[in-house]
Amino acid sequence: MFEIEIKPTILTIITTYKCTAACEDCCFECSPKKTGILNFEEIKEVILNTTKEYPSIKQIVFTGGECFILKKQLFDLIFISHNLGLKTRCVTNAYWAKNKAKAQEYSEALSKSGIDEINISTGHSHQQWINENTVINAIEALLNKNIFTLVTIETDRDNSDCINSFKFNSKVINLQDKFQSIFYISVNIWVSEKNKNNKIKLISGGCEHMFNNIVISPDKKVISCCGLTNLKVNEFKIGDMSNVAVYREEQKYDFLKLWIKTEGAYSILNKIGISSDRISHITHPCEACDFLYNDSEAIKNIKEKYTEFIIPVINSYNLQRLMKK
């Protein structure tokens, strides 16, 4: 039987579902009212256990919710990860930078802890809670500490212009000129349950994150997917974080996930005969995955047709692996 080689390079820890914002289309439905959170010892233990089980791990990602709710504990966890020789990244809405003094205080603590990268999420939904000026305070303070900073802006709604407002802000332009090598801006598709009229589509190609990113959730579970809809797919919830070996053991013969990694969920939907009008609304690969696992017609067609694709998918997977060596 063909066995999938599983050597993840990223450990993503969803530290909490609690957040300082309550974005309308948050993939985890995070808000200030949420209570689920991992404590310091739990996170430390899962970092040590996972890196021991998978020496291939190169990076720890702290996210949420809002991971900065952990405050000093977050800085200590970054420091521990850094001392293990791992790269570290935090994903945040930058709520902690409402004034420049606080922004500098947090950036100083991050620098001392050994952080490698900060990803800031902003845009229409986020800015209902954390305004543009707060985000710019964070960026300026981080860059002045030589911390790599990526700002991800969600695609605008018909009634917003956050992307242009941010990109053409004079402070942002000046910071881009001054810190070209460590400051980047990205526009990302915002998967919305209510707004299905996104004009941008990003659905081609295989999923590079499959088998490469172990996710730990605030309810102490191992999740096989780091995507926006991972909590909607039961097959992605594969075990308890006390046994991280489950990430390999539960997936090493999983053909459908291998197929997703190789070709992508949207391509699979086309190949198994799902009509284009049923999936024309899909703009993001995570939406395609959600549909693939939860739509009754898709499930039926996969069961009936998957054997036709086993050999070409395995051949394609092996070829991709050879090309990366």
Image (spheres, rainbow, N blue to C red):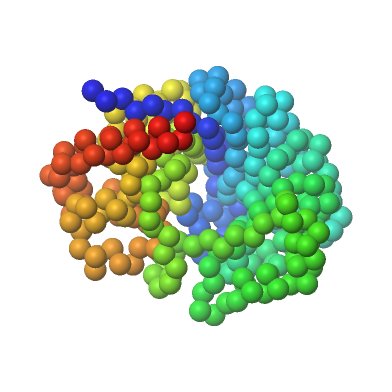
- Viewport quadrant of the N terminus: top left
Point out the residue furthest to the left here: 304
The answer to which image quadrant residue 197 occupies is bottom left
Point out the residue furthest to the right here: 101
Q: Nearer the viewer, residue 134 or 170?
A: 170
Tell me what residue is drawn at x 60 percent, y 35 percent. 60
Q: Is residue 3 left or right of residue 193?
A: left
Q: Position of residue 229 (x, y in %)?
A: 41, 51
Q: Nearer the viewer, residue 209 or 325?
A: 325
Q: Position of residue 214 (x, y in %)?
A: 48, 34
Tell me what residue is drawn at x 25 percent, y 54 percent. 269
In the depicted structure, whether residue 174 falls above or below residue 29: below
In the depicted structure, whether residue 98 falls above or below residue 247: below
Tell me what residue is drawn at x 34 percent, y 33 percent. 318
In the depicted structure, whether residue 1 falls above or below residue 104: above
Q: Is residue 231 left or right of residue 75?
A: left
Q: Is residue 294 visible?
A: no
Q: Position of residue 218 (x, y in %)?
A: 53, 39
Tell me what residue is drawn at x 51 percent, y 23 percent. 54
Q: Position of residue 258 (x, y in %)?
A: 32, 37
Point out the residue furthest to the bottom here: 159
The answer to which image quadrant residue 246 occupies is top left
Q: Is residue 194 left or right of residue 253?
A: right
In the depicted structure, whether residue 98 falls above or below residue 75: below
